[in-house]
Image: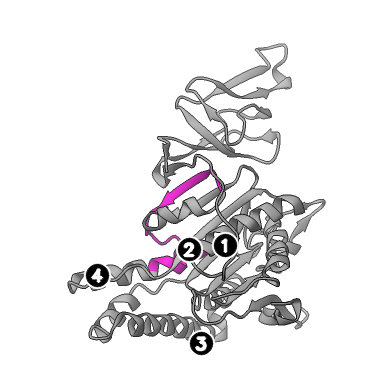
Amino acid sequence: MSKELISQENIVVGEIANGLPLTIPVYRLKGDGTGPNVYIQANMHGAEVQGNAVIYQLLEQLKSLKLRGDITLVPYANPIGCNQKSGEFTLGRFDPITGTNWNRMYRFNKALPSQVAEQHKDCDDATLKAAFKQALVADIDSQLTGPDYSLTTGKRIALNLQKLAHQADIVLDLHTGPISSQHLYCPEYAKDSASYFNIEHVLLIPSDFDGAMDEASFCPWWSLSEELAKQGREFAVQVEAFTVELGSQEKIDLSAAHEDANSILSYLNHKEVLVDAAYHPKAMTRYACMLEDYVAYYAPMGGMVEYLAPLGGHIKAGEPIAHILRMERYLSEQPLQTLSFDKDAIAILHFASASVNQGTELYKFFTNVFEL
């Protein structure tokens, strides 16, 4: 495959205030039709830009590979968010009009799995899968072609992206944290696949829907599997979807992006998207925790923070994780406070600023950790 075989389309996802179209670039590579189709998007949150560099590195390598499945790649998935600046900082985590998290606007029609399971109960697995994919896309189309007044800007963007994702068998949503180590949001049913990414920390999530892209992609298929189980029919979940957390926001690192692309290609090679490709997972110990054991640590006081817990590092209960400096109290009390955490844990991410109010989310920790 060469660069000439990569196609580009700019899809319209709305209009801005001067009436001009709001567009998103979509890159496509065609496979030979014998493997699963893939959808990868990046930069849904404005400051989370590293995924764009990863898509660049993926395209640089994919153009010389043979593919079994089609691959669709979408950088700059949220053109409003990535341009949502305040001084030198990018905001873009929340829709500035509605206040809703940009990654919580996707759709899950909970009635659809039972309807399709009943209508196609006598079909073979391949026919059933095709029918459900078609139903998912038609459901999104019904929203996009409904009354124009019923959709917010963010919802319209999300639905256009989701329509692309519903046509794939594998969905990867590329994100970053504030200041963060790499980690993978992985549905519990797909935990064996986590070992094919070169990512050391894995967060196992249930099949509950909370509005995110990964959930919007796999929850319908999980629900369909459950509905068919009620009929006494075993039907594996047909779609794998992951949120891939690439590190910290507000920067790109092309060297790291190359490694991230290799990690994704290792997973895709295992899933037989690639033809005779030499991508394999690195040997490493992978640590996991359940979503219910992913603990937020909030600042017990306001002040200026020195973050001590190393990201990706294992800490023991009672070890110092931060200093908080409170200079306005220099003469009245101890101005330097030491914070600790009462559990053995792995520090995954911390707040981006040293200046915090009481109640700010300082850290996120894996607890009750186990090896995959």
User: CA–CA distance between discs 4 and 2?
Assistant: 20 Å
Front disc: 2 or 3: 2
Q: Is residue 210 magenta?
A: yes
For the residues labelled 3 and 4, the Cα–Cα distance comes to 36 Å
Mark 1 vs mark 3: which is more N-terminal? 3
State the image coordinates of residue 38 (x, y, percent, origin top left).
Answer: 54, 71
Left/right of residue 133 with respect to residue 123 in the rendered view = right
Q: Residue at x 52, y 43 (%)?
A: 201
* Residue 252 seen: no
SS class, disc 2: strand
Q: Residue 29's quadrant in the figure?
A: bottom right
Task: Look at mark 1 in the image and give the residue it sits on.
Answer: 173
Q: Which residues are magenta?
A: 199-219
Say whether residue 252 is magenta. no
Relative to 154, residue 21 above or below: below
Residue at the spot x=34%, y=85% of the render? 127
Q: CA distance from mark 1 to mark 3?
A: 27 Å
- According to the picture, the residue beneath numbered tag 3 turns out to be 146
Label at residue 241? 2
